[in-house]
Image (cartoon, helix red, strand yellow):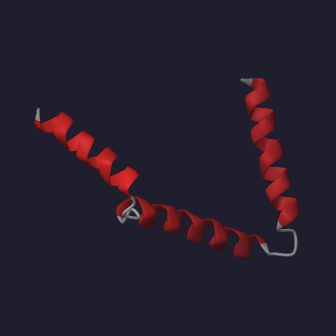
């Protein structure tokens, strides 16, 4: 668990280094936009056949 936490903080540090020119406010906004994009992707998934097949499989499982 300790190792996991260390790697997480290391990731955060790397991200901060990469975006050092940005203000914390800009960084927050960027994170929010990233999250929003992910949300939209989840709500409106790109209609690729693999995703559709997965959804159909799940529906079939639920229906019987």
At 87% across and 75% down in the image, what residue appears?
Answer: 21
Q: Nearer the viewer, residue 25 or 18?
A: 18
Q: Residue at x 83, y 44 (%)?
A: 10
> For the view shown, which residue lies furthest in the left direction?
64
The residue lying at 59 percent from left, 66 percent from top is: 34
Quarter of the image for the C terminus: give it. Answer: top left
Q: Is residue 18 above or below residue 21?
A: above
Which quadrant of the figure contains the N terminus? Answer: top right
User: Viewer-proximal residue, 63 or 14?
Assistant: 63
In the rendered image, residue 20, in percent from the top left (x then y), is placed at 87, 69
Horizontal relation, residue 60 to residue 55: left or right: left
Question: Is residue 49 left or right of 11 when viewed as pictured?
Answer: left
- Residue nearest the viewer, comparing 15 with 51: 51
Up-down: is 6 above or below 21?
A: above
**Total number of numbered discs in the rendering:** 0
Q: Residue furthest front?
A: 49
Q: Quadrant of residue 63?
A: top left
Image position of 62 (left or right of 28): left
Q: Residue furthest top?
A: 1
- Residue in view at x 41 percent, y 59 percent: 42
* Relative image position of residue 49 (x, y in whole percent): 36, 56
């Amino acid at each position: 668990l300790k190792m996991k936490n260390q790697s997480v903080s290391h990731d955060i540090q790397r991200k901060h280094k990469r975006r050092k020119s940005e203000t914390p406010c800009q960084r927050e906004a960027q994170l929010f936009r990233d999250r929003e994009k992910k949300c939209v992707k989840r709500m409106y998934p790109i209609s690729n056949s693999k995703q559709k097949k997965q959804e159909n499989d799940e529906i079939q499982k639920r229906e019987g």
